[in-house]
Amino acid sequence: MSVVARLSANVRRQGEGLDLALPYLLLAPAVLFAFAVLVYPIWDGIRASTMSYRYGKAVGWVGFDNYTRLWSDPQFLNALWVTVSFVALAVAFETVLGLALALFCANEFRGVRLLRGILIIPMVITPVVVAIVFRLIYASDAGMLTVVSQSLGGGPVEILGHPARAFLGLVALDVWEWTPLEFLILLAGIQSLPVEPFEAARVDGASPWRVLLDHTLPMLKPVLAIAIVLRTIDAFGTFDQVFVLTRGGPGEATKLLSIYGYDTAFKFQDTGYAAALFVTMGLLILAAALAAVRIMKGMTPP
Amino acid sequence: MTYRGKYLRTLSRRKLLQSAAGLAAATALPLGLTGTPARAAGGKLIIGAFADGGLTPFKEKIIPLAKAEGFDIQFLEDEYGVTLEKWFVDAQNKAGQYDLYLLDDPWVPQFGAADVLEDLGAAGIDSADTDWIGPLIDMGFWPPRKGPRIKAFQDATPKLVTVPFVGDLQTLTYRNDIYGKTAPATWDELIAKGKEGVAAGKIKYPVVFRGVTGNPIVTSWYPVFLAFGGEFFDDKWKVTFNSDKGKAAADFFVSTMKQNGPPGVVEFDSDQEGAAILGGDAGAIIQYSGNAIKSDDPKQTKVAGKLDFGIVPKVEKAIAQLGIFIAGVPKSAPNKANAVAFLKWYTSKATQAKLSEAGSIPVKRSAFEVANPGNRLIPIALKQLDAGAVPRPRTPDWGKVEELLGIELNKALQAGSGGGAALDLAAASVTAYLTKQGYY
């Protein structure tokens, strides 16, 4: 091989090597960052869930004992039931209300822009502040509901001391705060629908109710599914509002998985068991999301 | 010679190692090897506390005195519900965000068992000083000097890991226009005269307490339980709170006290019970000093001059629950020497006298005898200490035990009956939990 040929071969090899490595080098910082903030914490959580902790320190490997313990723990089963009930009820109300508001605000009328702006205000308020405000509304001694009731000649209104009312009070708080998110997503969905089918239906003399059932909802199904999935995932992790409003009481009526897990980890320092609880909770949310995505795929028009 | 060459020649590897070793020794000696840390320059001290009225005199009167003594104090307050976890994580991860924690005393076993606090006895705090109130200094040790110990610490030597800071305990606050100048001696008297006060339109209900699940309801129930003669555990950690006496106390609490308390008491926490007594609605309350010391301040109460203090009412005994603020120095404290120096100054006879004059309950007996205590509560607190006051059981699992008991008591309170059955349920849960933790 001539000197020139050898040199050019060398140059090509160097170029090929750099070309090969460059994308990885450029991606490396992002991959490392993702590993540090996403993969490692998940891995560490899973590792912790297989350990037994005592006095804040890991004392031994227990395999899947923490996971099996969950299913015989009445407090966990209660928290799971409360969480699923809370998510189902809150998301259902939020979706129906959000849809109604989106349908109303999709029309153009005087002041609609202002109304849309006002409607999303609850969503941007810090959850802790919302919870404090609702506590001031619900408190049986000096809360707003009690004051109103007493001014009308009634007695104190007890919300937070009664299991069913406290639970529904928590749902009401969540509905007030997060209906705007559903509203926003669904409004965007409605505004992106083609106008022709609706004009055709109007020409054919279809009632608004039939237009809603036969055109709006079928075409809006994918957006609805996205809204429901997002809210479901988010509602599963609800913590701040319960922490401030009820701390899980009265009794265990509002003890969500997040609160039980937090207490187990930080108050009772049963770190391994709490990790198993949160991993299980993560898997449940993942399963719910995957099921929703599957349903959503089935609904998407071809 | 270049600057670099001169530098390299001057700072040889050996010299560098010698300097580093010297610096390390100079830092370590005052902290660890000499036992008594010297105060670091500047006197910087970061104190962590949970928000509570019981610390108001300390904040308002003692911190300025400490500053005059050369301590540069940063006082960081948090809501009660988050401090335990926040400080435990700080201590365990050696984050070094605080020099001194002002703990609630039931947390001492958790921090002690995790071995994250300095041995203050070794650092020079004298626990043998006879001026300490005995039960209070006992609470500073881990493992406990008296009473049952958990298995893992059965043979360990007790160390003074915390130092009593404010000698808080439960006492009775009552309306003198309902009960007269003498505190009601029994629970029956408290309820009966309270009803007369309601009938006369002076108050809305005889008694107020905390009903929120977990720590609040157990704290309110505990003095009633002690009054009935109940005992929580035996010396082998066997649950005994569901004895006949315990059940009688629980039934009295969830039925009689509920009927004579405010509507909605199930959701009452310290802010609401404080508002009820200071607002003039309630006739009596068992409480810690946080709200009690506000009783004479017309800005904070509608019934100034009508509130007096007494020892807790009895059925069999008049025993209160101790719930003191207790100070611990994390091993990761950045200004450890300052923290120890501060504690020595704070627990001195002279500073304790100032604390008493400021209106806070001291931790040394001599300070109860000052000529002008800053609050009428202080002599009553000493009376209660002498009549009987006990801490909660010294176990790192107290938080979980309190949670399990609190849930059942709260459910019974909602129903207004079934206190005894609630204790049986709680006893079964607590026994199962402690069995799993290796207590038996």
Image: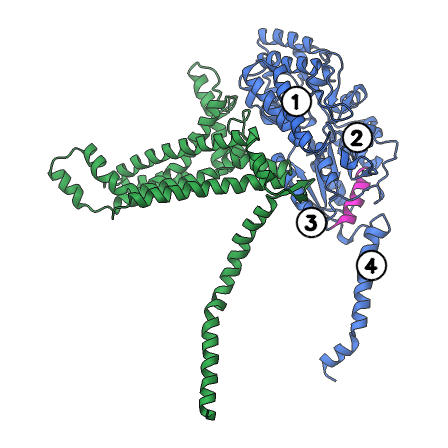
Chain colours: A green, B blue
Instruction: Classify mark 4: helix, strand or loop.
Output: helix
> Depth-wise, is mark 3 or mark 1 nearer the camera?
1
> Depth-wise, is mark 1 or mark 4 nearer the camera?
1
Instruction: Report which residue position mark 3 lands on.
Output: B94
- The answer to whether residue B340 is magenta is yes
List the single residue furthest toward the bottom. A2
- The answer to whether residue B134 is magenta is no
Chain identifier of the residue bearing label 4 in the image: B
Reading the chain from its start, which is encountered first: label 3 or label 1?
A: 3
CA gap, disc 2 to disc 4?
36 Å
Instruction: Report which residue position mark 2 lands on.
Output: B136
CA gap, disc 1 to disc 2?
28 Å
Residue B86, by quadrant, is: top right
Nearest the eye: A114 or B425 = B425
Q: Are marks 1 and 4 in contact (CB under 8 Å)?
A: no
Query: Which mark is drawn over residue B427?
Result: 1
Query: Which mark is drawn over residue B26?
Result: 4
CA gap, disc 1 to disc 4?
54 Å
Q: Do the residues labelled 3 and 1 touch (CB within 8 Å)?
A: no
Q: Which amino acid does label 2 sit on?
A: Leu
